Image (tube, grey):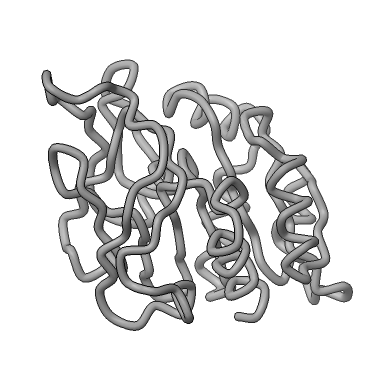
Amino acid sequence: MKNTNNAIVVVDYGMGNLRSVSKALEKAGGKVKVSSAPKDILRADKVIVPGVGAFKDAMAELKSRRLIEPIKEFIAKGRPFLGLCLGLQLIFSKSEEGGLNKGLGMVKGDVVKFRSKKLKIPHMGWNQLNIKGNCPLLKGVPENSYFYFVHSYYAVPEDNKCVAAWTGYGVKFPSVICSDNIYATQFHPEKSQDLGLKILRNFVKL
């Protein structure tokens, strides 16, 4: 199915901050469509899966709305995909949040909980990126730039080659994933002011 409008589809599965993500994308120059229709995902130029909430609930919602296979099929076609916050965690194999739950499995690895007794959980607020490589999502983003995070779990990839930036909070965790056409940020670009907008603009331009 050929896309005719080059829309960036923001997937509505009942667990995303859809309005703020959509507004930020429009500000970054994107033509945005919020949808929960599989056909819209398959026709899209780019797809974004935002997310706020629990991994188990998110996967249950994606399954009940029959969105898992369309998302996987979209990614398999090589078109740009972006996961935001929980959306980053969902692309991994499994998560220990709410018991052991299977993810989309597009990147091999697990999602585990912060276990520090000295630091506040969730990890909430501004933190820095330690950038690795040349991910197009991070073009023009200076080393040690600050972005806004809110999460209690983090990804542990099997192969760190997919990690484009690390962030430290008791442990070192991936804050940006860049693997072929799969991109994801653990932070919220839409809440990260000008640099967050730059990241969204970079995605729009892909």
What residue is drawn where x is 59% and y is 54%? 193
- The spot of residue 129 in percent (x, y) is 31, 60
What residue is drawn where x is 72% and y is 59%? 25
What residue is drawn where x is 39% and y is 32%? 124
Q: Is residue 8 left or right of residue 165?
A: right
User: Which quadrant is the C terminus positioned in?
Assistant: bottom right
| Front one among 178 and 77 | 178
Q: Is residue 161 left or right of residue 32?
A: left
User: Which quadrant is the N terminus positioned in?
Assistant: bottom right
Res. 116 image quadrant: top left
- The spot of residue 179 in percent (x, y) is 36, 70
- The spot of residue 134 in percent (x, y) is 35, 83
| Relative height, residue 163 to residue 92 (above, below) | below
| Front one among 76 and 196 | 196
Res. 151 image quadrant: top left
- The spot of residue 80 in percent (x, y) is 57, 71
Number of residue marks: 0
Res. 126 image quadrant: top left
| Relative height, residue 104 to residue 30 (above, below) | above
Q: Which residue lies furthest to the right in this view?
A: 4
Q: In this view, does 116 lie to the left or right of 20?
A: left
What residue is drawn where x is 51% and y is 52%? 83
| Relative height, residue 11 to residue 13 (above, below) | below
